[in-house]
Amino acid sequence: MKLNHLNLTVDDVPEACRFLETYFGLRPYDEGRRAKGFDVLFDDDDLVLTLIRGRRGVEISYPETFHIGFIQATESDVDELNRRLVADGYEMEAPHRAHGAWTFYFEAPGGFTIEVLC
């Protein structure tokens, strides 16, 4: 069995899509399309990640421990992605050892948490 899709509710669909494409290599369903309310991205294994804009005026709120994770091949890859994000102005903790992984967490544009780990 294989996980097919995941839906995230976000406060800005185009911004979240650009971010996930730029830093995590997700591919858009339609390169020329930039919908404000709903969009679709794919990872390297064709997992479908849908992003849907939340209701206007309602703050997006996930449970404290909710997050999505992007595994990297090496600890150096984790460090490099962290450096790149910080250099581009995103605030986040430095990678550290936790639950047997070299990892860091941060809030992504759109209002959800991402873990990057090896």
Image (tube, grey):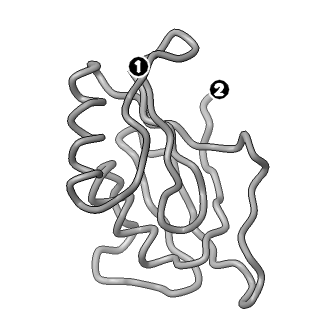
Q: Is residue 12 shown above or below 46?
A: below
Residue sitting at x 53%, y 17%: 98
Residue type at mark 1: give it.
Answer: Trp
Mark 2 Cα shell of 10 Å, populated few (<14), some (14-19), many (≥20) = few
Place of residue 78 in the rendered image (x, y in percent of width and height, measured from the top left): 30, 30
Contact, CB < 8 Å: mark 2 with mark 1?
A: no
Q: Exactly how many numbered labels are in the figure?
A: 2
Residue type at mark 2: give it.
Answer: Met
Residue sitting at x 39%, y 84%: 34
* Residue 75 disc label: none
User: Tag 1 or tag 2, which sits nearer the N-term?
Assistant: 2
Q: Is residue 39 shown above or below 19?
A: below
Q: Which residue is mark 2?
A: 1
Q: Is residue 70 shown above or below 108?
A: above
Place of residue 100 in the rendered image (x, y in percent of width and height, measured from the top left): 52, 9
Q: From the viewer's perspective, is 37 left or right of 56? A: left
Q: From the viewer's perspective, is 11 left or right of 75? A: right
Foreground: disc 2 or disc 1: 1
Q: Name the residue nearer the viewer: 106 or 67.
A: 106
Q: Which residue is mark 1?
A: 102
Q: From the viewer's perspective, is 115 left or right of 61? A: left
The quadrant of the image that shows the N terminus is top right
Circle 2 SS class: loop
Place of residue 92 in the rendered image (x, y in percent of width and height, measured from the top left): 42, 47
Q: Is residue 55 shown above or below 45?
A: below
- Residue 99 location, quadrant: top right
Place of residue 30 in the rendered image (x, y in percent of width and height, measured from the top left): 35, 74
Residue sitting at x 75%, y 46%: 64
